[in-house]
Amino acid sequence: MNTINAKTELYVLIGDPVEHSLSPVIHNSAFATLGMNAVYLAVQVRKERLKEAVDSTRALGVKGMNVTMPHKTEIIKHLDGLASAAEEIGAVNTVVNRNGKLIGHNTDAEGALAAIKNKVKTLRDKKAVVLGSGGAARAVCWGLAKEGCQIVMLARNVRKAKEVARNTEAEKLTADNLSNFIPKSDLLCNCTPIGMHRDETPVPKNLLRRELVVFDSVYKVGGTKLIADANSVGCTTVGGEEMLVNQAIASLGLWTMKQPDRDILLSIVREELGMQASCENIFLIGFMGSGKSSVGRALARKLKMGFVDTDSEIERMAGKRIKEIFAENCEETFRQLEMDAVHLASRRENCIIAVGGGAVLNHLNIQRMRSSGRIVLLRASPETIIKRLEGEEDRPLLLGLTNNQRLERINELLKIREPLCQSAKDIEVDTDKGSTEEIASRIVEALGVVV
C-alpha cells in the first residue's frame, strides 16, 4: 500500500499496554506483500473504556480487530456472537466485522500449537504445565487438551484456574509449588505477562532440564529470561514471536480469506527484534577478578559491539589512577565518579560495558543499567579471585593485605555485594573455568543471541 485514502481498510489492535506489540509490523507487512489497500494500528484502551472502543469499531467501520491483555475475556460481553472455539475457550483475540456484527474468534490456540508442534513430534500423552489463567492460558490449555496432553495449570487465581481447567478437560491443578510439577513434565508453557521486563522469570532456572520443551508466549528484544535460561540449560525452546506470527496469519485469514507467507513474516519479526536489540547494551557485573574486562573485550569482538570499561572511564575523568583516587580523596569520591561513569555508559548504544565490582552498591546504577541493556553477572569463587589477583597492587580495597587477609576481606565484601548482584542480574555465568573466549561464548548462548 502506497497511500491511505477513503478506500483504505482499517484494522486495529486494542490492549493495555500495546507499545511493545509487533502486530502492526506483521500485519502491515502482510498487507504490502498481498497488495492490499489496508492499514493496521495499535490502540491503547483502558479497562474502563473497553465498551467505548468496541462501539467505535462499529462506527468507524473497522474491518477487523485483534485483542490482547487485559481484554481477551472481558470483551466477550460487548460482541454480537462467538465462533465455537472462542466460546469453548472463553477468550477472544480476534474480532471480525461482518456487516456491522462483531464476531469473536480465537486464533491463539492455533498459533501456539502450530509453534510448539513445529518442535515436538507428538503431544499425545505428554505432561504439560501451563502458567497463567488469562486468555492466552485458556487458549493453550484448550489446544493442548485437544492434542491429548495431560495438563496442570498453575496460577495465582486458583478459582479462575480451576474453572479454566474444567472447561478444557485438563487435570485438577494447584496454584503454587512449581517444583512439584515441572520436574515431572515434558512441556512448560508460560502464558503470564511475566518476562516482559528483562529481570523477570516465572520459573527458577534450577527447575529446568535438558529434556523439557519450554514455550513462552511473551516475546521481546533479545528474548525473555525464561527462554535465555532454558537455552543455557539445553532445553528445546519456542519463542512468543512464533505464536504471534501464526495467530496473526490465522486472524488475517478470517478477515480477508488470504494467506501471506509465514516464513517471510517470521523473518520480518526477527529482523525487527534484531534491529531493536542492536541498540541494546550488555552490562557485565561481578567481583574484582571475575573477568569483566577481559571477557568483555572478547564478547565485544564476538558480537561486533563497542567496549567500555567504567573503571578506565573513571581514571580518564579524574586524570589519575583509581588507587590514587582512594589514597588522595576517599571511597565516597570514587563512588560518585563511578555513578557518573555508569550514567554516561548507559547512554551509549550497542556496547559491552564492564562495570566496577562495587557499582551494585548504588541502586541508581542498577536502575540505569536496566534501562539501557541486559545485566550479566560474572561469578568466580573467592579462591579463583585470589589466584587471579596475585601480585596485583592496584586494588585499593585489598592493598597491603596478605593472601589470608585478602581471602577474608573478599568474603566480607561478597557477603554484602552478592545479594545485590543476584537481584540485579538477568543471567549468571561462572568464570572459574574456561578461557575468555569460551566464557564469552557461554554468555552469547545464555543470552540467546545469534552471532
Image (cartoon, rainbow, N blue to C red):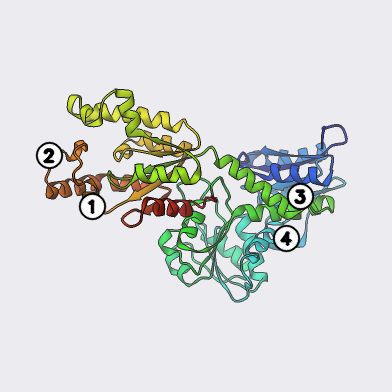
- Dot 2 or dot 3: first in sequence order is 3
Residue 268: % across, % down: 68, 46
How many marks are shown on the rendered structure? Answer: 4
Q: Nearer the viewer, mark 1 or mark 4?
A: 1
Residue 60 visible in the picture: yes
Q: CA distance from mark 3 to mark 1?
A: 59 Å
Residue at figure coordinates x 59%, y 66% from the top left = 165
- Dot 1 or dot 4: first in sequence order is 4
The one nearer the camera, 141 or 400, is: 400
Residue 196: % across, % down: 53, 47
Residue at figure coordinates x 80%, y 45% from the top left = 33
Q: Amino acid at mark 1?
A: Pro
Residue at figure coordinates x 75%, y 42% from the top left = 28
The one nearer the camera, 95 or 183, is: 183
Q: Is residue 149 left or right of residue 27?
A: left
Q: Nearer the viewer, mark 1 or mark 2?
A: 2
Which residue position holds label 4? Answer: 87
- Dot 1 or dot 2: first in sequence order is 1
Q: CA distance from mark 2 to mark 4?
A: 73 Å
Q: CA distance from mark 2 to mark 3?
A: 71 Å
Residue at figure coordinates x 41%, y 28% from the top left = 344
- Dot 3 or dot 4: first in sequence order is 4
Q: Are marks 1 and 2 in contact (CB under 8 Å)?
A: no
Q: State the mark number for residue 382.
A: 1
Above or below, 369 relative to 337: below
Q: CA distance from mark 1 to mark 2?
A: 18 Å
Q: Are marks 2 and 3 in contact (CB under 8 Å)?
A: no
Q: CA distance from mark 1 to mark 4?
A: 59 Å
Q: State the mark number for residue 95.
A: 3
Q: Nearer the viewer, mark 3 or mark 4?
A: 3
